[in-house]
Amino acid sequence: MDSSSGIQASLAGRYATALFELAREERKLDAVATSLAALKTALAESQDFAALTTSPLIGRGEATKAVAAAATAMKLDPLTANFLGVLAQNRRLGQLGPAIRAFNLLAAQHRGETTAEVTSAHPLDDDQVAALKANLKSRLGRDVAVDLNVDPAILGGLVVKVGSQMIDSSIRTKLNTLAHAMKG
């Protein structure tokens, strides 16, 4: 089973695959990717937007109106705005984060890139991201797109997942390993 069929197996993956196919047909992959990156940032930085996608108290009609307003305010491309509307209509806004990740994986495969999921304790700056991409490219022998996530719980270092491989250099893991070794 290749990774694209694994993506399609999940609910978020089915939504992402439909969006990807439509964006590819209409030659709008870059516009959709840019809009999805803005949505990913909004999910991470706006408590109100995150609550809109997860609250069971917000009705279908309210959610649909709210995402339409958000799409306009964020200047999202029409395909992504429609995608958000479909998620709201189907009461699937909770799938937005996983759908964005799945879309990014599909887009990277389409470009012939490998995608690395990178988790850091703090946001990485452009120089750090460039250095990380260069390091991963030299290790893997091909271009690597990075899906950046921030999780303060890892304390420091990085957790990098590429396919089934995981490189965990987080301080939390090192401390847990040390604590385990000290127990004997």
Image (cartoon, rainbow, N blue to C red):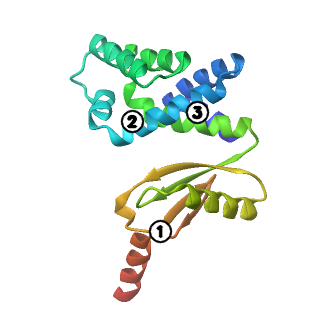
Q: Are marks 3 and 2 in contact (CB under 8 Å)?
A: no
**Residue 44 spot, x, y in % from top left:** 37, 42
Most extreme residue toward the left, as rendered?
57
- Going by the numbered disc 2, the residue's amino acid type is Ala
Q: CA distance from mark 3 to mark 2?
A: 17 Å
Q: Earlier in the sequence, mark 3 or mark 2?
A: 2
Q: Closer to us: mark 2 or mark 1?
A: 2
**Residue 17 spot, x, y in % from top left:** 61, 26
**Residue 173 spot, x, y in % from top left:** 43, 71
Task: Provide the residue designation for mark 1.
Answer: 157
Residue 42 is marked as 2
Residue at 29% x, 27% y is 52
Sort mark 2 into few (<14), some (14-19) or many (20+) by Cα contacts within 10 Å.
Answer: some
- Going by the numbered disc 1, the residue's amino acid type is Gly
Tell me the element at label 3: helix
**Residue 109 spot, x, y in % from top left:** 71, 39
